[in-house]
Image (cartoon, helix red, strand yellow):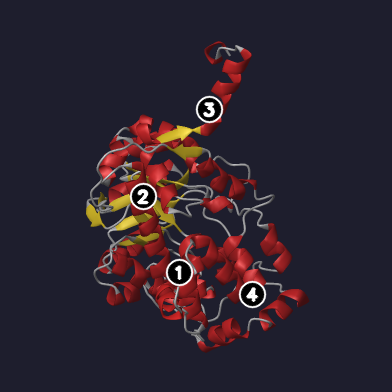
Amino acid sequence: MKVSEARQLIQVKAPVFSRQRRVLANAFSVEEYRKAARRVLPGGIFDYLDGGSEDEVTLRRNRAVFDSWALMPSWGPVSGPDTSTTLLGKASALPLTLTPTGATRLFHPEGESAVAAAADRAGIPYGLAGLSTVPMETIAADSPGLDRWFNIGLTRDAQALKDKLSRCDAAGFTTLIVGVDTRALGARERDLQNGFTAPPALTLSTIADIARRPAWWISFLRADGISFPNLDSRRAAAPSVVTPAMWQQLLGHSDATSGWKELEALRQAWHGKIVLKGCVNPGDVAKAARIGLDAVQLSNHGGRQLDHMLSPMDVLQESRQKVGDSLEIYVDSGIRRGSDILKALALGADACSIGRAYLYGLAAAGSPGVDRIIQIMADELRRTMTLVGVSSIPELQARGGEILRDIRRSSEILAATASGTNLEDQ
């Protein structure tokens, strides 16, 4: 082969001096963006993003459960495939939502605004956290076409609830997400070790680690002070200094005395859609359907609250059987691949939600990093749909039982067959 011919087969990449551009050009999975985020963020901030509670059994289980389901392709023609769907009556380009995350500006100075802009460009819903660092009115003004959801806490204060709902309505937020898995703060031991407490009690090693991340520190200092402007039920303004009480709200928990009564009152007061987030109990899913909620987001808070907890995938099929088509079911906690989305939809979900995954992209490369995370998952979902032999989301959901096999159950059957045991007799 001649040198001139070889040169046509080999492309030499020009050096890229921008760290952000290097990440965008060379990171091809959520895990690679996770590693890039780890290089950018101080250790304590990264652990706050990445860690779970206690022994992190739930955190690990959230990933392991996806590996227990194996794909079984079938031969036949595939067109598209088409990943579009409808969520709560609105078109979505993907069966995917960006779930609320608090204090997002800890990971990048643009914070929630960058995430909202990426969701708007992708044509998927975005849930703004009650503990977000950007006013909901700013999100509405900057991303008017975005399908905007808001994470609200239950309260027995009728006037405060009325004021908050009025503010959400005025800002064009059509869906409320009600979290019910923070009645107590999970023991996030990484945060305790790093002094990420309320208020912070930074150790010398934590301070030294921050000093080793000058780019993050400079960006953090140049940005406006972190505040939580959506905590106030009536106005966007909030103190620029984070007080101990604010840290308690950031790291703390919701009102443990609130329950179904308050949820029913919210249903009566709010004219839009309501998503119940944070349960993995099929009985709770059924009750949510009975009181007229529109969707349930099966979640264990990404393994950050109760350790040794069931994964949403463990209860997805039973939850769907309980409620039929009476409400939509979303799955979060551990979604890292487009194939994870396909598996969840095949088992009965209407969509999946990601939090950590898009924060890795945000920390590593700003809003373009969030774009890239969404694009990676969309590409993976389309590729997996093509390879298993489905052309659309409705077809995937209709044929779900043909596509997946529980390899844990298969192993039990093989072992029982080899030993001559009848599993039905056990």
The mark nearer the N terminus, 3 or 4, is 4
Residue visible at 53% across and 38% down? 68
Comparing 91 with 242, the one in front is 91
- Give the CA distance from mark 2 to mark 4: 34 Å
Against 2, residue 280 (above or below) is above
Residue under pointer 1: 132
Q: Which amino acid lies under the numbered mark 1 shown in the image of this protein?
A: Ser
Q: Are marks 3 and 4 in contact (CB under 8 Å)?
A: no
Which mark is nearer the camera, 3 or 4? 3
Per the rendering, the mark at residue 336 is none
Q: Evaluate whether residue 380 shows in this view.
A: yes
Which mark is nearer the camera, 1 or 3? 3
Q: Do the residues labelled 2 and 3 touch (CB within 8 Å)?
A: no
Residue under pointer 4: 42
- Please give left or right for residue 324 compared with residue 19 in the image: left
Q: Which amino acid lies under the numbered mark 3 shown in the image of this protein?
A: Arg
Q: In which quarter of the image is residue 390?
A: top left
- Please give left or right for residue 48 compared with residue 358 in the image: right
Q: Is mark 2 on a helix, strand or loop?
A: strand
Residue under pointer 3: 409
Residue 12, given in percent of the width and then of the height, sits at 47, 79
The mark nearer the N terminus, 2 or 3, is 2
- Give the CA distance from mark 1 to mark 3: 42 Å
Q: Is mark 1 on a helix, strand or loop?
A: loop
Q: Are marks 2 and 4 in contact (CB under 8 Å)?
A: no
Q: Which amino acid lies under the numbered mark 4 shown in the image of this protein?
A: Pro
Residue visible at 63% across and 15% down? 419
- Please give left or right for residue 298 compared with residue 309 in the image: left
Residue visible at 36% across and 58% down? 378
Q: Which amino acid lies under the numbered mark 2 shown in the image of this protein?
A: Val
